[in-house]
Image: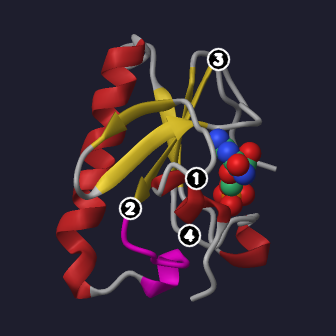
Amino acid sequence: MAETIFSKIIRKEIPADIVFEDEQVLAFRDINPQGPTHVLVIPKEEIATANDIGEEHELLIGHMVRVATQVAKDEGIAEDGYRLVVNCNPDGGQEVYHIHLHLIGGRKMTWPPG
Ligand code: 5GP
């Protein structure tokens, strides 16, 4: 897949407000937040879209969800609630083709999404 801006963030070539990092994932604040808390959890492995998740990624994707829920607790939004979103391809509103989990919270969300 073509490299995205998120690869540069992983390599620390461009700055990001990182809230969590380990050998598998990076979590950092979205540059255009859609709520008081808006954190992106990304794998360090380049996976373009949700369609590219294979059996070999099951543990990694589970880890991304666990990291997101831990960040929600750290941010103090776990009890009130939050939204976890993966946008896929144009109809899903995906802009960056390096898979990422949006953690959005700190405000009341509406449903259905636009
Ligand atoms: P998507 O629409 O692909 O699901 O979400 C991409 C997200 O990445 C958007 O919410 C956008 O604001 C965020 N984003 C794009 N470029 C950057 C960047 O350079 N730094 C940070 N922190 N977030 C970015």
The one nearer the camera, 99 or 3, is 3
Q: Residue furthest front?
A: 13
Label 2 sits on what residue type? Pro
Between the residue at mark 2 and the residue at mark 4, the CA separation in whole angstroms equals 8 Å
Residue at (63, 72) in percent of width and height = 88
**Residue holding disc 1:** 13
Label 4 sits on what residue type? His
Between the residue at mark 3 and the residue at mark 2, the CA separation in whole angstroms equals 23 Å
**Residue holding disc 2:** 43
- Badge 2: residue crowd in 10 Å (few <14, some 14–19, many ≥20): many
**Residue holding disc 4:** 98
In the rendered structure, does residue 50 fall within the stretch colored magenta?
yes
Disc 2 and disc 4 in contact, CB within 8 angstroms: no
Q: What is the x, y in percent for residue 18?
A: 47, 33
The one nearer the camera, 7 or 82, is 7
Q: Earlier in the sequence, mark 1 or mark 4?
A: 1
* Start-end of magenta stretch: 44-52
Q: Is residue 112 visible?
A: no
Q: What is the x, y in percent for residue 44?
A: 38, 63
Residue 102, relative to residue 71: is it above or below? below
Q: Nearer the observer, disc 2 or disc 1?
A: 1
Q: What is the x, y in percent for residue 71?
A: 36, 28
Q: Secondary structure at mark 3?
A: loop
Q: Earlier in the sequence, mark 2 or mark 1?
A: 1
Label 1 sits on what residue type? Glu
Between the residue at mark 1 and the residue at mark 3, the CA separation in whole angstroms equals 26 Å
Q: How many marks on residues? A: 4
Between the residue at mark 2 and the residue at mark 1, the CA separation in whole angstroms equals 17 Å
